[in-house]
Image (cartoon, rainbow, N blue to C red):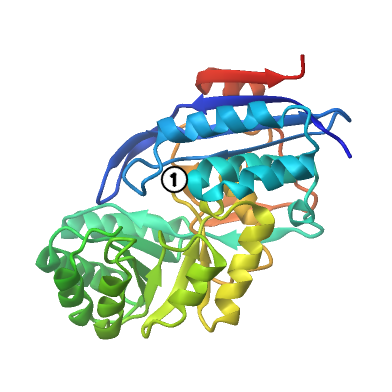
Amino acid sequence: MAKIQRATLRRLGLPLIRPYRLSYRTFESFEPFLVEVEDDDGRSGFADGHISPGSSAETRDGGWAFLCESLQAAIGVETAAAKASVLDRFATSKVAATAFATAIEVLEANPLLDLPDATILPLLTPLNALEPAAIAEEIEAWLAQGFGTFKVKVGKDVDADLKRVAVIQEATRGRATLRLDANRAYSREDGERFASRLDPEGIELFEQPCDADDWDANAAVAAVSRVPLMLDEPICTLADIDRAATITGVGYCKLKLKRFGGLDRLKQGLDAVRQNGMEPVLGDGLGSEIQGWLEACVARTTIRNAGEFNGFLKPRDRLFVEPMPFQDGAIRLPAGYRPRLDRDAVERFTLERRDFQSP
């Protein structure tokens, strides 16, 4: 069995085209950790993960320290053993552990990365405008670009949120599907008030109304919601999926590669959502082009709705020599697509770097 001979860890800074606003933070740039590994047979692999401050208890400092320790310990260790070791500590730093484990899966040429046929994967896009005229203008622009599913952020003010959703419903007039996302910002009471007053016309789902750890509050909102609820941040293991399936009104679970432990585990989780009678949704809107490619490869055989792995469209620049093809609202991967890192771009966006190798 091949052993890991060297590894490189980088913190990247990817400036965004425009600020990306969430209920808990506005991002001017993405700062993923890029992990590259090479074994003593000369095979190499890479993956990354973006720890979003405020999204969970995981911190960037903690993730960096976890990866430095894990990569150093993996030098001279067989790839399978190194992957098993880091996943044994998955709960300590989920995004960091996933980045390392996935880099090993890429090195090992995981079959999920094989694309025997051309693949088209529609994506959703966020709606950012707040005023009615600007909302209508933005909707027409996105429709003209081929998008058919819009994400609408809510969670700050119930009455204002309901009014804005109604304006969006009127402006789309059945031409697009809406996903509403509170990013955990509602209290139980506000979440119930919002969800119970929704007009369900054109709304596919309502995502994560309350705190990720407050399963009872989310269940209470699901019980009164006029549209199916989707859980997001709490879904990191198969046990979480099983638990979600017991909650009346939860019709969707969203999974993200960065907090599921790797490609194989992600596919297993997506399949488990459907086996539990729910519909899986996949994708990280805060992910780089690397994360988007990896999630797209898994999405090819697991989801049947608009992907949320659209983060790669937000930075000003891409990270691949052969940028991931995107046109008319969809990723369009040609058969056999296997990207290479653009070394000049990687160096240009590197904010911090650590190298690990055999003596």
Q: Position of residue 79 (x, y in %)?
A: 78, 40
Image quarter for residue 196?
bottom left
Quadrant placement of the N terminus: top right
**Amino acid found under the numbered disc labelled 1:** Leu
Residue drawn at x 48%, y 68% is: 240
72 and 27: which is toward the camera: 72
Q: Is residue 325 visible?
A: no
Q: Can you name the residue that lies furthest to the top here?
A: 359
- Answer few, some or many: residues within 10 Å of disc 1's Cα (few below 14, many 20 plus, some between 14 and 19): many
Q: Quadrant of residue 27?
A: top left
The residue located at (68%, 40%) in the rendering is 103
Badge 1 marks a residue whose secondary structure is loop
Residue 275 in sight from this viewpoint:
yes
**Side (left or right) of 255 relative to 212:** right
Residue 298 locus on image (x, y percent):
66, 59
Compared to 124, does 2 lie above or below?
A: above
Report the residue at 47% width, 70% height from top. 253
28 is higher (above) or lower (below) than 269: above
Q: State which quarter of the image contains the C terminus.
A: top right
Residue named by callout 1: 286
Is 203 displayed left or right of 112 in the figure? left
